[in-house]
Amino acid sequence: MRLAVLTMTLCLLAGCATTRPCPKNTAPTSAQTWRASGKIFTLRHGGVLMTGGRTLQMTGLMKLDTGRGRADLAIFNGFGLKLAVLRVTPETTEVRQLSPMAEMIPHFAEQAGIVVRTLFLQGRPADQCAEVRNENSVRAAGVSFPATITFKELRYGYTVILRLKDVQIHDQ
């Protein structure tokens, strides 16, 4: 069973290994008030990774510390198996744990860090090679978060769609 899951995941994500030229004039995303709030949030997202005509369901749990400008997150596949544990800052992605399954996916940790950095820490594509679209919003304790975020990476040709499932705000 594990071999079948691993094989299916690798086949689904094989498209991450190919690169495409980066088009010009990709627009930055809009500013979000929670980025400058100095608060700590716990966010739970359901997500879909689409690449090469294939789809992989994922779940993420993230502690977003806007005061320190960092995000600690765990990413799980659709079966609940942990793929990665990362710490992302505006400049770096620190891999704290990477499953053997995720190690076999080209650029997995690096690209996950770029998605988190762009969507939650910087608010704009770092290399201007991504399109980001926010839809609807969820309001918690006076702060609005995008309910659905679509991140389309143009160089590697993948799309990530995140749907906010839960948000909690923590006191410092």
Image (tube, rainbow, N blue to C red):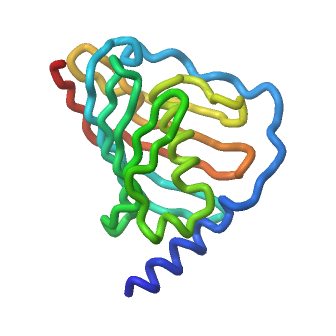
Give the residue displayed 74% in from the left and 46% down from the top: 155
Picture coordinates of residue 159 (x, y %)? 60, 49
Give the residue displayed 66% in from the left and 43% down from the top: 153
Picture coordinates of residue 64 (x, y %)? 33, 30
Which quarter shows the C terminus? top left
Q: In this view, does 132 lie above or below 95?
A: above
Answer left or right for 72 relative to 49.
left
Q: In this view, does 135 lie above or below 50?
A: above
Give the residue displayed 29% in from the left and 35% down from the top: 63
Answer left or right for 103 relative to 159.
left
Q: Is residue 62 above or below residue 156?
A: above
Q: In this view, does 56 lie above or below 8?
A: above
Picture coordinates of residue 23 (x, y %)? 82, 36
Which quarter shows the N terminus? bottom left
Picture coordinates of residue 36 (x, y %)? 39, 12
Total tally of numbered discs in the picture: 0
Q: Quadrant of residue 130?
A: top right
Answer left or right for 154 relative to 144.
right
Considering depth in this image, is 68 or 83 the residue closer to the camera? 68
Give the residue displayed 51% in from the left and 27% down from the top: 90
Considering depth in this image, is 111 or 34 the residue closer to the camera? 111
